[in-house]
Amino acid sequence: MERGERIESPDEMTPEYREHLVHLMLMQADSELAGGYGYVPWITKAPTVEEKHVVSQIVKDELRHATVMYGLLADLGFDVDRHVQAHDETFRMRIAADADIGTQRITSDKRVNIFYYPIDTWADFVFFNFCMDRGAGHQLEDVRQSSYGPWARAIEGIFKEEKFHIRHGEYWVKRLAEDPATHDEAQATFDKWYVRTLNIFGRPGSVKNQRYRAYRLKLRDNDEVRQAFAAEVAGLCEKFRLVVPPWTPRWSELPEEAQIPG
Ligand SMILES: [Fe+2]
Ligand SMILES: [Fe+2]
């Protein structure tokens, strides 16, 4: 592994490697599915016919990502049908728009907890793409170079589609932030999703992260990935005249591990 050789099949894995791999891939698969479901109402609510088509394309992408990830899990002998039937991936909290659940888990599936928050407005939809898809993209950078060959290769296609979601978010964020009529709503929506996204990366120096890195299932420390995300967003906000909200990390409340979303 240190020489960059990859694992290609289950019979090359130790039980511990397989356990970590299943956990990480399931977190991504459940997030892809819950993510896609959360966008569905916006196929009809998007502002123009072109945008309805874009949203339906994004829903299709997320469902494709979920299918690919569950397929990889099935190859490892994981019972995908039983898992999907046992969990309600459509669940979304009906909570106040400015609620903060921190890193709390609510359902028994493995989705990253940002997928509990409802997407109530068009600004929510595009800022979610701007913040969360970008955060996911930074985490997937590690997967592209990970030690499990089938996952690393599957990520290439997923990554390209996530880039399209991020660019779509960015186009609209610029538009909403620069228009005086929507600037304040843009800033308030950004404040919400930015902090929620920072919560997904896990705490610095976590023991679990070190174990993943020993197996080359991850390459960087949780906080290094978070900083890369924050630096990119800070640069864009300067251009779009958005203020980056303050974030005081409560490390003790952050999960031991980063969560891999998609
Ligand atoms: Fe996406
Ligand atoms: Fe995705």
Image (tube, rainbow, N blue to C red):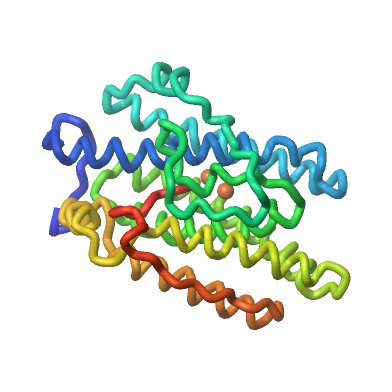
Q: Is 2 drawn above or below residue 50 in the view shown?
A: below
Q: Is residue 5 left or right of residue 199?
A: left
Q: Quadrant of residue 22?
A: top left
Q: Is residue 203 left or right of residue 188?
A: left
Q: Position of residue 45 (x, y in %)?
A: 81, 42
How many numbered dots are placed on residues in this image? 0
Q: Position of residue 11 (x, y in %)?
A: 15, 30
Q: Nearer the viewer, residue 93 or 229?
A: 93
Q: Residue at x 62, y 76 (%)?
A: 236
Q: Is 26 drawn above or below residue 76 in the view shown?
A: below
Q: Residue at x 67, y 46 (%)?
A: 119
Q: Nearer the viewer, residue 28 or 103?
A: 103
Q: Quadrant of residue 151?
A: top left
Q: Residue at x 86, y 44 (%)?
A: 49
Q: Position of residue 217 (x, y in %)?
A: 26, 51
Q: Quadrant of residue 115?
A: top right
Q: Is 257 drawn above or below residue 116 in the view shown?
A: below
Q: Position of residue 29 (x, y in %)?
A: 44, 36
Q: Is residue 216 left or right of residue 38?
A: left
Q: Is residue 262 left or right of residue 203?
A: right
Q: Residue at x 72, y 47 (%)?
A: 120
Q: Is 49 drawn above or below residue 164 in the view shown?
A: above
